[in-house]
Image (cartoon, coloured by chain):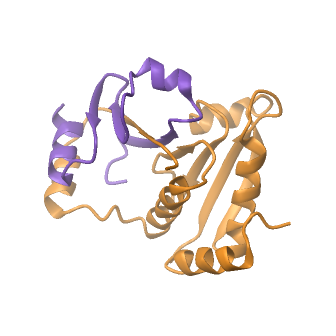
Chain colours: A purple, B orange
Amino acid sequence: MESDHVTTAAVSAVEFPDLVRRFRVSGVPKTVINESADILGAVPEADFVETVVNG
Amino acid sequence: MSYFSDEEMKALTERLSGMTNPVRLVLFVQTFGCETCATTKRILEDLPRANALVTLEEKNMVLDTGDVELFGIIAAPGLAIIGDRDRGLRFYGAPDGYELISLLEGILLASSGDSGLTEESRALVATLAEPRALQIFSTPT
């Protein structure tokens, strides 16, 4: 919401097993960034934003 | 007929009473190969009843290809949550169980137009020059 460069999709892991397999979702919540990097679990906001912005 | 009981509708109305600005929900469904599209539609139809600031539009994943492309929808049921403008909020799957709480949170965010991030986080996000597509996987329980 703070940047027009960022889109956010919430995905139900139960309903989309093909996406779960594709992104190797082994636990939730898991955040996949640009279909490559990821963040597993709930992490502090500062760490989350840092990973999203700087990888 | 309402998906939610009177008691649940009361809770829903209470939760959405924090809305300040209109939110447009654009739902993408398909007739075949979508087990939860009908349920999702029933759940979402209760939201404008809970708060008149919510509007719901229905699109067909197969027929409305222009809209699928416009909103970048990748699966059905797929939902675009739009406040003062499209800030890229999407929701895939039936919003039941804990997923409903996430959806309501998304609606409130879109309504306020405020991410709620700290000043430090906002400043860092503002430095982004390239696209970031986040997909957050969760479960209803």
Foreground of the two, B81 or B2: B2
Query: Across the whole image, how many numbered discs are drawn on residues?
Result: 0
The residue depicted at 58 percent of the width and 30 percent of the height is B74
In the image, residue B10 sits, relative to residue B122, either above or below, namely below
Foreground of the two, A11 or B22: A11
Tell me if residue B57 can be seen: yes
In the image, residue B133 sits, relative to residue B59, either above or below, namely above
Q: Residue A10 appears at what percent x and percent y?
A: 47, 44
Please state if B53 lies on the left or on the right of B136 as rendered.
right
Tell me if residue B52 can be seen: no
Q: Residue A30 appears at what percent x and percent y?
A: 35, 37
- Give the position of the N terminus of chain B as an image quadrant: bottom right
In the image, residue B84 sits, relative to residue B27, either above or below, namely below
The residue depicted at 56 percent of the width and 58 percent of the height is B100
Q: Residue B44 appears at what percent x and percent y?
A: 69, 58
**Most extreme residue toward the top, as rendered?**
A22
Q: Residue A26 appears at what percent x and percent y?
A: 37, 28
Quarter of the rendering containing residue B72: top right
Foreground of the two, B14 or A14: A14
Please state if B100 lies on the left or on the right of A41 as rendered.
right
The residue depicted at 69 percent of the width and 64 percent of the height is B55
Please state if A50 lies on the left or on the right of B43 as rendered.
left
The residue depicted at 76 percent of the width and 56 percent of the height is B42
In the image, residue A16 sits, relative to residue B120, either above or below, namely above
**Most extreme residue toward the right, as rendered?**
B1
